[in-house]
Amino acid sequence: MLLRVICCLCLLGGFSTRAAEPLDRPQIEAQKLLLQKERDDIATVFAVAARQCWQRFLVNDCLHAARLQRRQALSPIEKQDQALRAAQRSLAVIERQERLDAKQPESKEPHDARP
């Protein structure tokens, strides 16, 4: 089941191609919600795998393998999340610069025009 989740993540993981395009806030929030859903799915799969580990004789080895699979599944999601946070920061910088530009007077003359 974890393998199925990982395959779905690979198919859905087109954020790197979209990162070159400027994103707006609704797109960023939608992608963050999608990433959170994927994290929740991985957590559910891990919980089921961990529960099954307690039915085995070698519990620690099984739990170790389940944790390793969880980390491997979360790794691309974390990279996508970092890219989204970077896009969100750059969007905030652009919006701040636009607000500052809107506050500036139209004339670009210096205040102190001494010869």
Image (tube, rainbow, N blue to C red):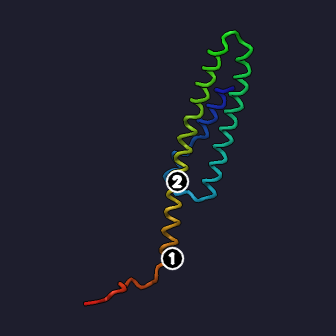
Q: Nearer the viewer, residue 73 or 66?
A: 66
Q: Counting other residues with Cα less than 10 Å from the Cα at mark 1, is it few (<14), some (14-19), or many (20 or more)?
A: few
Is label 2 in a helix, a strand or a loop? Answer: helix
Q: Is mark 1 on a helix, strand or loop?
A: helix
| The N terminus lies in quadrant | top right
Q: Is residue 34 above or below residue 8?
A: below
Question: Do the numbered discs 2 and 1 sit on residues whose CB atoms are within 8 Å?
Answer: no
- As drawn, the residue found furthest toward the top would be 57
Camera-nearest residue between 112 and 52: 112
Label 2, on which residue?
87
Q: In this view, does 111 lie above or below 75?
A: below
State the residue at coordinates (66%, 45%): 34
In front here: 27 or 32? 32
Pinpoint residue 91: horizontal percent, then vertical percent: 52, 60
Disc ID at residue 102: 1
Identified by mark 1, the residue type is Ala
Estimate the x, y position of residue 52 in percent, counting from the top left.
Answer: 73, 19
Q: Which amino acid type is marked by label 2?
A: Ala
Q: What residue lies at 37% left-to-right and 86% top-to-bottom?
A: 111
Which residue corresponds to the image point at 66% horizontal and 29% vertical from the top-left?
4
Seen in the image, is 7 located left or right of residue 49?
left
Give the residue displayed 52% in from the left and 57% down from the top.
Answer: 22
Sequence order check: which comes first, mark 2 or mark 1? 2
Q: Is residue 98 shown left or right of residue 113?
A: right
- Per the model, the C-alpha gap separating discs 2 and 1 is 22 Å
Residue 5: x and y in percent read 66, 31
Q: On the image, which quarter does residue 58 sit in?
A: top right
